[in-house]
């Protein structure tokens, strides 16, 4: 369970694993923001609601991560709490509803890392293996 | 895998042909030294699922590609399209390729010259560094002082650098020394999503992070006095390099159009070798829309670098009272673009859509697109080094016009992953080491500094020397960093 960073020649690779699809999305999001900030320093002061749809889990994960990157710029915020997240539907029509929590970026209190520009499709994978969901992706920094 | 597609044919010391096999419409051409050619082949033969040689082959397999799929001396794997990759397409039956531009549309370099001597910088090194660091927003979450509405963003996307000049950032004369005069035609803001515009509201005039930087440099060595003279570069002069791009707007366009062009690829039956190599026919509604969006991104990057040029002047005025008018633009070039250009193909002039991904335009003597004072020697290429290493000014050539559609290298490329760099280097140590080399560093992120440690990059000199010896882009000047501002 959890996420880890992978070697990648130019950018940064991530791998996440969880028992549930929701848990996997939460881990992946934490890994994404863990690149940009020390997550322990991000307080849950602002909530943002999200509703996303996709025709399979892989596309839904791509949208989820891309949407988080967009939200960061739209509100100049970082997020560290992804606990409120539900995925409904079956494989051909999935819907994600989430409330992510975080706060305004503040270099005075946040130890900032590198800005992620976007999520790439290079080696993008999502699969269920031995009862666990796993994903891999590369972010463009 | 002993596949014939990897049997490179040596044409000369710095030119290798990738044979036209399988689905390829044209051969590949690599402008690299023997060692790099061998590395590229070894990597492909080892079955690495992400390698630059296969990407050159995949690009060569797209319809309407002209002459060859090209790899420059700094070639390395990118997203769908190799970085250091160039491909030109016939507008009649060719395609516009998302991966051929990428996320950071028109990322590029502006080079400013100052009337300062190195001694003057030494005297006020800390004041200059601090003033630049405080005046030019950099790093994750930094916001620019220009707060724009959607309407104003639309103007940025149409007007490019001119928008920033009209807002008081920089001089009218700057634009003469920017590619396209700082503004490319055919940018319709309606082809850019509202989301992309909203992400950009406060990002004009911000540097960003990652490999973007602002550097105060000294001209350390001149190799080509005639070209240096034309560009107004003198040994010992102090110059400033600004490396950044179209920020969040470009990233969002890149993301939005990956999906749109995936649909278009399926609709028009175009090959999708990698998910980021999606495309649309140039002559289709989707292709025209994508090109319009790319031009919006190009203009956004022009506006961004123009705004930062204005802020840089303000910082120098604040630190040492330097008159803003005394800081002049030498040139500005992008290295992630797709543009319609006229090139000679089989003896005839033809309009082509040239994609340069991690490649700088390198137009040779006589091209009308160049500022008139540079037209005799060819256009400047601004090649970024890394923090501790030198940057270079090269020049375009007739060789480049004939062999690479007037394209050249853009930088060094990474040798070490960011993860490895972070575990190997400490940001604070990197700063100390640079200090001992006479380089002042200001950063918002020490982890970011570790990722960008000079040791994590390939040797820029090797790349530049291959670019020089191949005859494509001869060296003009070497720039050595004095002050580095990182996001």
Image (cartoon, coloured by chain):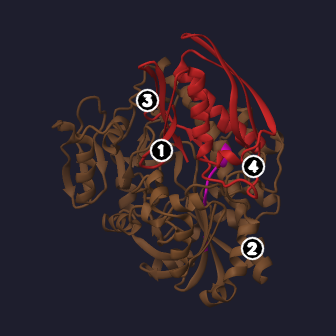
Chain colours: A red, B brown
Answer yes or no: do the residues labelled 3 and 1 have beta carbons within 8 Å? no
Q: Are marks 3 and 1 on the same chain?
A: yes
- Locate residue A96 relative to residue A133 in the image: left or right: right
Q: Which residue does the numbered mark 3 point to in the structure image?
A: B93
SS at mark 4 in the image: loop
In which quadrant is the N terminus of chain B drawn?
A: top left
Q: Quadrant of residue B87?
A: top left
Answer yes or no: do the residues labelled 4 and 3 have beta carbons within 8 Å? no
Q: CA distance from mark 1 to mark 2?
A: 37 Å
| Dot 4 crowding, Cα within 10 Å, few <14, some 14–19, many 20+ | many
| Residue pictured at 49% horizontal, 57% vertical | B422
- Magenta segment, which residues? B240-248
Q: Which residue does the numbered mark 2 point to in the structure image?
A: B131
Q: Which residue does the numbered mark 4 point to in the structure image?
A: A105
**Which of labels 3 and 1 is toward the front?**
1
Q: Is residue B432 above or below residue B403?
A: below
| Residue pictured at 50% horizontal, 47% vertical | B341
Q: Quadrant of residue B257?
A: top right
In which quadrant is the C terminus of chain B drawn?
A: bottom right
């Amino acid at each position: 369970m959890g996420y880890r960073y992978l070697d990648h020649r130019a950018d940064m690779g991530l791998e996440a694993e969880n028992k549930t699809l929701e848990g996997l999305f939460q881990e992946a999001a934490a890994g994404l923001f863990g690149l940009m900030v020390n997550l322990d320093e991000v307080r849950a002061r602002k909530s943002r609601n999200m509703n996303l749809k996709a025709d399979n889990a892989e596309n839904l994960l791509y949208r989820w991560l891309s949407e988080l990157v967009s939200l960061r710029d739209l509100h100049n915020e970082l997020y560290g709490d992804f606990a409120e997240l539900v995925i409904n539907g079956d494989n051909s029509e999935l819907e994600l509803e989430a409330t992510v929590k975080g706060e305004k970026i503040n270099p005075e209190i946040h130890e900032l890392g590198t800005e992620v520009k976007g999520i790439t499709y290079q080696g993008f994978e999502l699969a269920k293996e031995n009862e666990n969901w796993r994903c891999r992706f590369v972010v463009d920094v | 895998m002993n596949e014939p597609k990897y049997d490179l044919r040596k044409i000369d010391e710095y030119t290798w042909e990738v044979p036209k096999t399988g689905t390829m419409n044209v051969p590949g051409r690599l402008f690299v030294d023997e060692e790099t050619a061998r590395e590229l082949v070894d990597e492909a033969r080892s079955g690495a699922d992400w390698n630059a040689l296969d990407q050159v082959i995949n690009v060569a397999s797209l319809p309407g590609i002209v002459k060859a799929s090209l790899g420059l001396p700094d070639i390395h794997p990118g997203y769908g399209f190799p970085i250091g990759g160039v491909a030109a397409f016939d507008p009649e039956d060719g395609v516009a390729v998302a991966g051929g531009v990428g996320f950071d549309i028109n990322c590029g370099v502006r080079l400013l010259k100052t009337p300062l001597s190195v001694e003057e910088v030494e005297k006020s090194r800390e004041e200059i560094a601090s003033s630049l660091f405080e005046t030019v927003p950099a790093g994750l979450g930094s916001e620019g002082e220009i707060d724009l509405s959607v309407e104003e963003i639309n103007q940025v996307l149409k007007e490019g650098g001119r928008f920033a000049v009209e807002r008081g950032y920089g001089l009218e004369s700057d634009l003469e020394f920017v590619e396209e005069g700082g503004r490319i035609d055919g940018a319709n803001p309606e082809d850019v999503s509202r989301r992309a515009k909203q992400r950009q509201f406060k990002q004009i005039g911000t540097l960003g992070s990652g490999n973007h930087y602002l550097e105060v440099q000294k001209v350390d060595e001149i190799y080509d006095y005639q070209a240096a003279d034309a560009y107004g570069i003198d040994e010992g002069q102090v110059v400033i390099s600004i490396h950044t791009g179209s920020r969040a707007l470009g990233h969002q366009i890149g993301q939005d159009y990956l999906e749109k062009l995936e649909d278009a690829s399926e609709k028009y039956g175009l090959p999708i070798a990698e998910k980021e190599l999606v495309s649309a026919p140039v002559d289709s509604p989707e292709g025209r829309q994508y090109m319009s969006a790319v031009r919006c991104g190009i203009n956004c990057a022009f506006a961004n670098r123009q705004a930062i040029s204005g802020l840089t002047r303000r910082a120098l005025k604040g630190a040492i009272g330097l008159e803003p008018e005394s800081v002049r633009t030498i040139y500005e070039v992008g290295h992630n673009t797709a543009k319609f250009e006229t090139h000679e193909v089989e003896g005839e002039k033809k309009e082509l859509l040239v994609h340069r991904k991690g490649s700088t335009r390198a137009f040779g003597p006589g091209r009308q697109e160049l500022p008139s004072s540079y037209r005799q020697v060819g256009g400047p290429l601004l090649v970024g080094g890394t923090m501790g290493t030198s940057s270079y000014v090269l020049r375009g050539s007739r060789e480049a016009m004939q062999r690479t559609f007037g394209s050249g290298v853009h930088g060094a490329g990474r040798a070490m992953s960011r993860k490895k760099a972070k575990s190997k280097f400490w940001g604070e140590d990197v700063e100390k080491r640079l200090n001992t080399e006479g380089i002042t560093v200001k950063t918002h992120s020490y982890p970011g500094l570790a990722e960008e440690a000079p040791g994590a990059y390939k040797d820029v000199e090797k790349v530049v020397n291959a670019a020089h010896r191949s005859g494509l882009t001869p060296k003009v000047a070497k720039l050595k960093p004095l002050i580095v501002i990182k996001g």
